[in-house]
């Protein structure tokens, strides 16, 4: 029983980071209804950003978060203006393929630039704290993951407030609700979409920079996170940002509890099984509005 | 496709590997094998993706089913690969129908993610299931063929003739697939698929059971993938989960389909003939240089896919070739 409780605690910690991975997609896919199969590749770029920052500049990888966010915001906007704007109005499959092309392009450009070797971020604050656990009621909570989770939670809540409580967020929601009507009240939809892509890319890249403290960075690291993020957004309910957080926590818990009973290879299988099950029984997601 | 172009293409496909083989370039015969294999997969994927308009991201699961069923039958019962082909295709169709029926409730992106989810669940099963030897893989029994007839029946071809023989095996299967799918394309079935793609509510309004026909479409795709998987298993002489469940068995056929022309019977063939050799030619040109094995070919693929999606989402076959041809002929006069 303690074993399971411990797994739940670990899963919740991991889930907080997953929430940050998924929330970028919650904006692009959930809110703006555009597909992006290269989501995990943006995360991979964030991981490499943090790795490059810590090995070349010898600074803590956590300090890479602001520059990574800034650069990737620009990259996200660029992806929208150069590529996605052109396929936005056409058929869905053109969007899907545009981002599959992007997926191949980004992943293999990373292979060309960095080779497929595993890169580890070393000497950062989180890696120096590794092994330090907080003990609460017989359960131990890893400090590095706790800090990472807290950081992810803060960023997540900042985004939530941005989308739900500011004028800009309203404009974003209005664009997703009805493009033409938004134009009538003076919102420029193209700009909104570009900003949404920028935000989405920046958020997932920051998640990557945080994850780089725990996982090796390599060009193929992204795809499983892409699928995981889709499962989380769909589980959470389309366009519901808080739903995304709850679904991410759930996914983290399902993963770590699965590993208690089954070989680690199955840790994602149950996440996807629950995605299938909930997708069939409750298509609007666990916390969807409609 | 005009009859003349078809005849020319068939002739090239039949004759091209022979000079290559005679000149000792059996590597290029293997490239041709991979081109036809991917063209066949693309034609199969086109049924669910192009005709029925349902984005299937995980048909590679059925490639693996075909490979494993035929390999298991060969290992345990010493069954001929041709019987294995029948069994593998049958198993894939049944498994596909059972798995696809529930997810046909989902539409658009949700269906796509569901097919990925099934693939994600298949991977750990493939890696741990003892019946199929987990990640240690299944090895096909080696035994030399007793004669030419036995070689064809058991798909065991000696030494250097193997590349050429397997090329013709896949070519025959590909031709059968094309003929069968052309019949499907022109039958009521093809009409129903397109009706569901273009307007699902409208199709249901005239009495088409959209879920049933989506299942049929995906099962046809699964059958083609399973058949290709069987040939691949006997070509590779072993089946490993990470190899037959590789994502590229889904993405390459999809890319071929989109580049050539989604929804048209010949689109995937054009796409595969253009795309697959790029990879191999680049491998040969980059040689052992600093950029060898660094995925440059896939960077190029990515750029091509993005360009096609952004500029000509209906693929190269949708370009006005006929008008261009006429203008060219007209000028000469």
Image (cartoon, coloured by chain):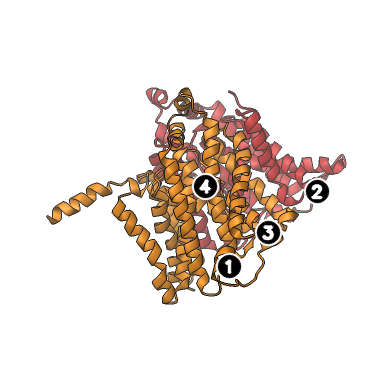
Chain colours: A red, B orange
Q: Quadrant of the C terminus of chain B?
A: bottom left
Q: Which residue is mark 2?
A: A133
* SS at mark 4 in the image: loop
Q: Residues within 10 Å of mark 4 (few under 14, many from 20)?
A: many
Q: Residues within 10 Å of mark 3 (few under 14, many from 20)?
A: some
State which tag comes first along the sequence, 2 or 4.
4
Q: Which residue is mark 3?
A: A123
Q: Are marks 1 and 4 in contact (CB under 8 Å)?
A: no
- At 82% from the left and 41% from the top, the residue drawn is A4
Q: Disc number at residue A241?
A: none
Q: Chain under label 4?
A: A
* SS at mark 3 in the image: loop
CA gap between label 4 and label 3 equals 30 Å
| Same subunit, tags 2 and 4 | yes
Q: Where does residue B276 sit, x and y in percent of width and height?
A: 45, 59
Res B168 seen here:
yes
| Same subunit, tags 1 and 4 | no
Q: Disc number at residue A38?
A: 4
* SS at mark 2 in the image: strand
Q: Chain under label 3?
A: A
Q: Nearer the viewer, mark 1 or mark 4?
A: 1
CA gap between label 1 and label 4 equals 48 Å
CA gap between label 1 and label 3 equals 63 Å
Q: Residues within 10 Å of mark 2 (few under 14, many from 20)?
A: some
Q: Nearer the viewer, mark 4 or mark 3?
A: 4
Q: Nearer the viewer, residue A124 or A36?
A: A36
Q: Chain under label 2?
A: A
């Amino acid at each position: 029983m303690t074993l399971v409780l411990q797994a739940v605690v670990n899963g919740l910690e991991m889930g907080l980071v997953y929430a940050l991975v998924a929330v970028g997609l919650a904006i692009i896919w959930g809110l703006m209804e555009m597909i992006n199969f290269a989501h995990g590749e943006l995360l991979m770029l964030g991981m490499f950003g943090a790795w490059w920052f810590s090995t070349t500049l010898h600074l803590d990888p956590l300090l890479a978060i602001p520059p990574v966010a800034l650069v990737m915001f620009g990259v996200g906007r660029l992806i929208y203006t150069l590529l996605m704007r052109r396929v936005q109005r056409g058929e869905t499959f053109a969007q899907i393929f545009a981002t599959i092309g992007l997926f191949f392009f980004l992943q293999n450009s990373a292979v060309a630039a960095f080779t497929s070797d595993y890169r580890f971020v070393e000497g950062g604050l989180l890696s120096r704290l590794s092994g330090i656990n907080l003990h609460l009621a017989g359960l131990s909570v890893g400090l590095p993951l706790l800090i990472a989770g807290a950081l992810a939670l803060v960023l997540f809540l900042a985004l939530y407030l941005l989308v739900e409580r500011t004028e800009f967020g309203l404009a974003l929601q209005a664009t997703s609700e009805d493009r033409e009507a938004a134009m009538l009240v003076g919102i420029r939809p193209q700009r909104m979409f570009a900003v949404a892509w920028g935000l989405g890319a920046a958020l997932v890249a920051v998640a990557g920079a945080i994850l780089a403290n725990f996982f090796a960075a390599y060009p193929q690291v992204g795809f499983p996170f892409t699928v995981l993020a889709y499962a989380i957004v769909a589980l959470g309910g389309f366009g519901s940002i808080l739903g995304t957080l709850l679904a991410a926590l759930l996914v983290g818990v399902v993963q770590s509890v699965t590993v208690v009973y089954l070989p680690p290879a199955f840790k994602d299988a149950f996440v996807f099984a629950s995605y299938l099950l909930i997708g069939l029984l409750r298509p609007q997601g666990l916390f969807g509005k409609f | 496709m005009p009859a003349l172009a078809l005849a020319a293409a068939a002739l090239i496909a039949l004759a091209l590997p022979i000079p290559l083989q005679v000149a000792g370039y059996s590597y290029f015969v293997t490239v041709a094998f991979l081109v036809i294999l991917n063209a066949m997969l693309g034609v199969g994927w086109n049924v669910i993706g192009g005709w029925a308009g349902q984005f299937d991201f995980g048909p590679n699961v059925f490639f693996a089913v075909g490979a494993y069923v035929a390999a298991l039958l060969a290992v345990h019962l010493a069954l001929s690969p041709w019987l294995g082909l029948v069994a593998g295709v049958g198993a894939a169709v049944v498994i596909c129908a059972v798995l696809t029926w529930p997810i046909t409730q989902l539409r658009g992106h949700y269906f796509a993610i569901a097919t990925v989810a099934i693939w994600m669940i298949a991977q750990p099963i493939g890696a741990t299931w003892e019946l199929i030897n987990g990640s240690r893989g299944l090895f096909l029994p080696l035994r030399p063929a007793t004669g030419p007839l036995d070689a064809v029946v058991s798909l065991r071809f000696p030494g250097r003739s193997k590349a050429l023989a397997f090329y013709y095996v896949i070519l025959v299967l590909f031709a059968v697939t094309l003929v069968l799918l052309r019949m499907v394309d022109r039958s009521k079935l093809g009409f129903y698929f397109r009706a569901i793609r273009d307007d699902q509510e409208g199709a249901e309004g005239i009495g088409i059971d959209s879920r049933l026909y989506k299942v049929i479409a995906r099962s046809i795709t699964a059958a083609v993938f399973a058949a290709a998987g069987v040939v691949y298993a006997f070509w590779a002489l072993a089946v490993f989960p990470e190899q037959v469940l590789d994502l590229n068995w889904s993405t390459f056929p999809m890319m071929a389909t989109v580049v050539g022309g989604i929804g048209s019977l010949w689109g995937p063939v054009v796409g595969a003939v253009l795309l697959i050799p790029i990879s191999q030619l680049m491998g040969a040109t980059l040689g052992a240089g600093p950029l060898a094995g660094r995925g440059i070919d896939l960077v190029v693929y990515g750029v091509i896919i993005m360009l096609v999606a952004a500029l000509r989402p209906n693929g190269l076959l949708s370009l006005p070739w006929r008008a261009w041809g006429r203008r060219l002929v007209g000028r000469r006069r």
